[in-house]
Image (cartoon, rainbow, N blue to C red):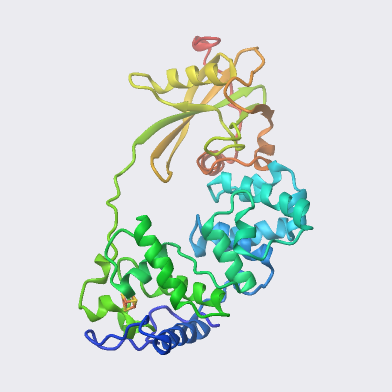
Amino acid sequence: MTGSAAGEKVGHGGPAGACRDPLDGAAETAAFGRALLDWYDAHGRDLPWRQTRDPYRIWISEVMLQQTRVGQMEAFYTRFLDRFPTLADLAAAADAEVLKAWEGLGYYARARQLHGAARQVMADHGGALPTTRDGLLALPGVGPYTAAAVSSIAFDRDHVVLDGNVSRVLCRLLLVTDLPTRQSVRQRLIEAGERLLVRGRAGDFNQALMELGARVCLPAAPRCDGCPVGLWCRVRAAGADPTAVPQRRPRRPGPHLQVTAGMIWRGDRLLLAQRPAGGMLGGLWEFPGGKQEPGETLEACLRREIREELGLNITVGPEVASVDHAYTHFRITLHAFSAWSGRGTPRTLACAAWQWVAPADLGAFAMPRSDRRIIEYLVAQQGGVHPPVRPPSRHRGGH
Ligand code: SF4
């Protein structure tokens, strides 16, 4: 495979109006498959996870691909596998090490499930990943997408993989205009995909469709003139606007929350709290705080949150940084304040654990991206995370 430009004219899209049906008999299906695979063999990107037949590495790549773009993923993939080169290494690691290696990727529940599945593979399968879709589905956290992807790419099992790119490509090829997330549409696409699949090269076929969706059949600007399977595309033959196929659910902007975080000092140590394992960002360490309630000042919010979460009374100092961060369904502005704690010992009222940490050790903890950006901001602005000179005396010990 080579990494030539996506816009290169490599295909035979053919004029709009001419259309062959890829499902019209074995010969047409085979011709479609050949055109797709010839294009992929010549123009597919030479990505690190395509250079291996190691099922463990393919598994890691497929889990990561579900939550980040290829361009951003390569560095995470390399870093994770440098740290855990084998499934046995991952299974033997401590929870905190796995979260730390996953830091920045988001969806931390996936990291915990991956870790749990690796342990189960060591315990029940002698360290070898199951080779079938059903065997993979039996592992914790492995869903239909991952099971189909790993079984086809690592073990050449004849299963189609339906991710967002593949759904869009199939909808356009077959002129399916309905929402692809609908169960009936999904089922139709899977059945069509299984019929189109090139037996014995299912892994390459799936990756070719993914690649086509990522580089040619783009959501907003499909490159139909260079499309290697344009001859079989019903949207193109119908002269329809490909960007209108399939339907897309209108995105409603999620709420924008104001969230506080306390950089709470005791001497030269900062307080970190660990989020409860089961929830969002579970297991990560953060500057404690929480969401502002209506009518509450940010300072009052922070004092309340720290009382509720850690049973501590604090003195809130100046705001030292704020960052915006977008999650899937909402956005936040995180306001970080300097603060000082009274004498009490923190309690784990609404966190899993807490620690007083020297600023130099902050890098050792797996933290949410927004907290990490607060640290990066302070390093850029003042050369590091330093304790403020002294608490404002008029607030000392106040609430
Ligand atoms: Fe190819 Fe997609 Fe254009 Fe159809 S809509 S010709 S599949 S790029």
Closer to us: 243 or 24: 24
Q: Is residue 127 above or below residue 192?
A: above
User: How many numbered discs?
Assistant: 0
Vertical position of residue 48 compared to residue 137: above or below:
below
Residue 88 appears left or right of 293: right
Q: Position of residue 205 (x, y in %)?
A: 50, 77
Q: Is residue 222 visible?
A: no
Query: In x, y percent, where is residue 295?
Result: 33, 19
Q: Position of residue 183 (x, y in %)?
A: 38, 56
Q: x, y percentage for residue 89?
A: 76, 54
At x 54%, y 80%, the residue is 199
- Residue at 68% over, 27% down: 356
Residue at coordinates 31% horizontally, 83% vertically from top-left? Answer: 225
Q: Quadrant of ligand 1?
A: bottom left
Q: Report which quarter residue 353 is drawn in.
A: top right
Residue 260 sits above or below residue 131 on the image: above
| Residue 44 in sight here | yes
Figure quadrant of the N terminus:
bottom right
Q: Tell me which corner region of the image, top left, top right, bottom left or bottom right, holds residue 87.
A: bottom right
